[in-house]
Image (spheres, rainbow, N blue to C red):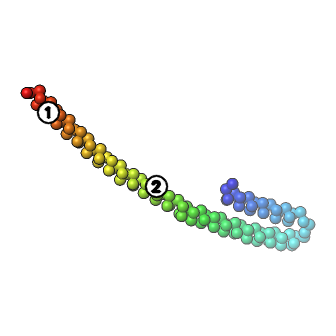
């Protein structure tokens, strides 16, 4: 369940409970207005608290991401860099071996041609 959905449900439930209590209790007009004003103030305070908690949650998630995800990304970058370096060394070694094979083939062709001409 998403946290924002939970807090929204909490706020809606609080409003519904306040309205139910207000309308189910027999009161005079001035008492009703006073109750509504009190319930409204309580609701505003609860919503402010919910908003503060949501902001704290956002900060916690952001801190978690910065502390845990960023090092993992750096580790992957380092691994890829190391792989590229290793790959470049292998590529250079393979190019040298291919060059040596080509030189050996050319030498063999010259040797066969010289044997054939004799």
- Which quadrant, please, contains the C terminus? top left
Give the quadrant of residue 61: bottom right
Q: Nearer the viewer, mark 2 or mark 1?
A: 1
- Circle 1 SS class: helix
Rendered position, 95 above or below 115: below
Callout 1: 10 Å neighbours few (<14), some, many (20+)? few
In the picture, measured across the screen, residue 65 lies left or right of residue 115, that is right
In the picture, measured across the screen, residue 52 lies left or right of residue 22, that is left
Say which residue label 1 marks.
111
In the picture, measured across the screen, residue 92 lies left or right of residue 40, that is left
Say which residue label 2 marks.
76
Callout 2: 10 Å neighbours few (<14), some, many (20+)? few
Q: Nearer the viewer, residue 22 or 74?
A: 74
- Circle 2 SS class: helix
Query: Residue 56: x and y, percent?
Result: 63, 67
Q: Nearer the viewer, residue 5 or 12?
A: 5
Residue at image position (63%, 64%) is: 57
Query: Residue 24: x and y, percent?
Result: 89, 63
- Which quadrant, please, contains the N terminus? bottom right
Rendered position, 77 above or below 41: above
């Amino acid at each position: 369940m998403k946290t924002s959905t939970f807090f929204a449900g909490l706020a809606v439930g609080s409003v519904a409970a306040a309205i139910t209590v207000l309308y189910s209790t027999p009161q005079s007009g001035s008492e009703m207005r006073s109750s509504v004003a009190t319930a409204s103030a309580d609701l505003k305070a609860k919503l402010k608290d919910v908003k503060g908690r949501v902001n704290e949650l956002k900060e916690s998630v952001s801190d978690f991401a910065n502390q845990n995800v960023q090092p993992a990304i750096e580790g992957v970058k380092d691994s890829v860099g190391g792989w590229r370096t290793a790959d470049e060394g292998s590529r250079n070694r393979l190019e040298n071996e291919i060059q040596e094979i080509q030189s050996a083939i050319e030498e063999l062709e010259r040797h066969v041609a010289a044997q054939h001409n004799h």
